[in-house]
Image (cartoon, rainbow, N blue to C red):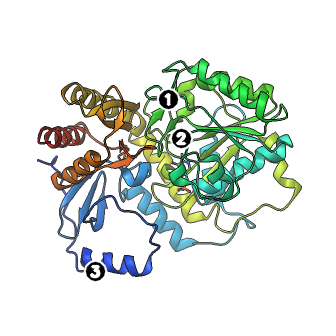
């Protein structure tokens, strides 16, 4: 049974799931997907739990796609948002307001070296668009290198850098080269990071004039299926890129804010210091906010023209961001992600020994992946099976994510306040479902 939780959701008097679904079909873009045959109507959230219209509780193992780091409706974050909303909901960064500068300072203090200049955006896509623009301006080059299997966003530049056909439309996306993914499970060089890194040098040698604007990558690919870059890869590639005059961009949209447990930022586990760091998702615990952080020298390039957006650095969002940083620290959420994530990974790895269907268990902290395959030797994606397991886990009270190029990888990215009991509940639900197949 679900871990005990002393909270009763309020009586729901809104429309039913069927009514909402009908409206969604009529008025929302048909592109919006849903994982379940009968989508759940989520009406309330507290900590690591979500409640449906009947007051039924679910363990949220997806965390709003690695976004709700402090837990749903964390009282400190809610209070910060409410207080700021009452004082000043919006003006513009053309005027001064300390909600914005206080958060910029606190954020900069979490980054190493000379990464001290913050530019706020509204999303991860915008943050990466800006990072790519800055790199092009700073270097005077056009070529961007990203990894096959990466997800960086869905605007013109970031869709180009994203490298999965299912996320790309057939429009012109020039100047991007996609390097061989250093994927220890499916990649051609196994876990040998330095071998994969040679592909980046090859791209520079054979596909560019010898200079590049930037290399951009996640530390753990999220949408791509929770793939940890092979060890040794990032330091080697960062060296190569520096020699080619380019900047290194770390996309921390999913892996940042303590999610990986061992470090606050995903790149730190690879012993590299990027030139530009982009972030979103966890930064506001669900409030739309993103940021680009870089050095004063690099940030200077934006002064050549006007560069500005209306909402980036909205005081309500930055007040939320400051509260998030304080909660992560006060409640030791990064440390918790390490302890609970390591425990859950052990439990999932034990399931891999028990069930042939599990081909791989990977990830760090509370950013874990479980890849399902129908044939371990051939690594055949288990697409029908993953949908079935997902449905069954929902029935048992677990909402879990899914992704990967083949769509056959469970993504476990819960709020960082997840407990060992929650971890057991998720692992038990998966165990029970797999035992019935
Ligand atoms: N980068 C990464 C690593 C992401 O996972 C995402 C979102 N899934 C983005 C960028 C884009 O962020 P957003 O959806 O906020 O535009």
Residue at image coords 47%, 61%: 80
Residue at image coords 43%, 43%: 404
- Going from the N terminus, do you reach mark 2 or mark 1 first? 2
Q: Is residue 102 visible?
A: no
Question: Quick check: 437 left or right of 294?
Answer: left
Residue 399 image point, x, y percent = 28, 52
Separation (CA) of disc 2 from disc 3 = 37 Å
Separation (CA) of disc 1 from disc 3 = 43 Å
Instruction: Using the image, tell me which numbered label, if any, was put on residue 19.
Output: 3
Quarter of the image where one finds residue 419: top left
Separation (CA) of disc 2 from disc 1 = 9 Å
Instruction: Using the image, tell me which numbered label, if any, was put on residue 149.
Output: 2
Q: Nearer the viewer, mark 2 or mark 3?
A: 2
Secondary element at tag 3:
helix
Q: Residues within 10 Å of mark 3 (few under 14, many from 20)?
A: few
Q: Nearer the viewer, mark 1 or mark 3?
A: 1
Query: Circle 1 sits on which residue?
Result: 183
Question: Quick check: 347 left or right of 322?
Answer: left
Q: Is residue 284 above or below residue 109?
A: below
Q: Is residue 77 above or below residue 344?
A: below
């Amino acid at each position: 049974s679900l871990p005990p939780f002393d909270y009763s959701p309020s009586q729901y008097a809104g429309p039913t799931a069927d009514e909402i679904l009908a409206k969604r079909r009529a008025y929302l873009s048909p592109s919006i997907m849903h994982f379940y045959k009968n989508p759940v109507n989520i009406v309330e959230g507290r900590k690591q739990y979500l409640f449906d219209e009947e007051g039924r509780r679910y363990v949220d193992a997806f965390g709003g796609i690695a976004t709700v780091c402090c837990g749903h409706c964390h009282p400190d974050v809610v209070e910060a948002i409410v207080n700021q909303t009452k004082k000043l909901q919006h003006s513009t960064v053309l005027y001064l307001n300390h909600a914005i500068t206080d958060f910029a300072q606190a954020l900069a203090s979490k980054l190493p070296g000379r990464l001290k200049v913050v530019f706020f955006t509204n999303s991860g896509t915008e943050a990466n668009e800006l990072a790519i623009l800055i790199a092009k301006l700073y270097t005077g080059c056009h070529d961007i290198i990203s990894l096959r299997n990466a997800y960086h966003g869905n605007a013109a530049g970031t869709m180009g850098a994203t490298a999965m056909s299912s996320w790309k439309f057939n429009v012109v996306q020039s100047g991007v080269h996609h390097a061989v993914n250093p994927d220890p499970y499916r990649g051609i060089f196994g876990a040998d990071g330095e071998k994969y890194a040679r592909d980046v040098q090859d791209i520079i040698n054979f596909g560019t004039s010898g200079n590049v604007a930037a290399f951009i990558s996640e530390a753990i690919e999220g949408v791509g299926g929770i793939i940890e870059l092979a060890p040794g890869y990032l330091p080697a590639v960062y060296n190569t890129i520096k020699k080619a005059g380019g900047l290194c961009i770390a996309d921390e949209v999913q892996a940042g804010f303590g999610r990986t447990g061992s470090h606050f930022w995903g790149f730190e586990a690879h012993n590299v210091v990027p030139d530009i760091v982009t972030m979103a998702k966890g930064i506001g615990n669900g409030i739309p906010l993103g940021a680009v952080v870089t050095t004063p020298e690099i940030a200077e390039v934006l002064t050549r023209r006007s560069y500005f957006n209306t909402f980036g650095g909205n005081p309500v969002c930055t007040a939320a961001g400051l509260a998030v940083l304080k909660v992560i620290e006060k409640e030791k959420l990064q440390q918790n992600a390490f302890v609970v994530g390591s425990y859950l990974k052990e439990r999932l790895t034990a399931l891999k020994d028990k069930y042939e269907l599990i081909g791989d268990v990977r990830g760090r902290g509370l950013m874990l992946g479980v890849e399902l395959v129908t044939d371990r030797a051939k690594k055949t994606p288990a697409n029908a099976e993953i949908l079935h397991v997902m449905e069954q886990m929902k029935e048992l009270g677990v909402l879990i994510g899914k992704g990967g190029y083949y769509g056959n990888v469970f993504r476990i990215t819960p709020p960082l306040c997840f407990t060992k009991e929650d971890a057991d509940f998720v692992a038990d639900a998966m165990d029970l479902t797999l035992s019935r197949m």
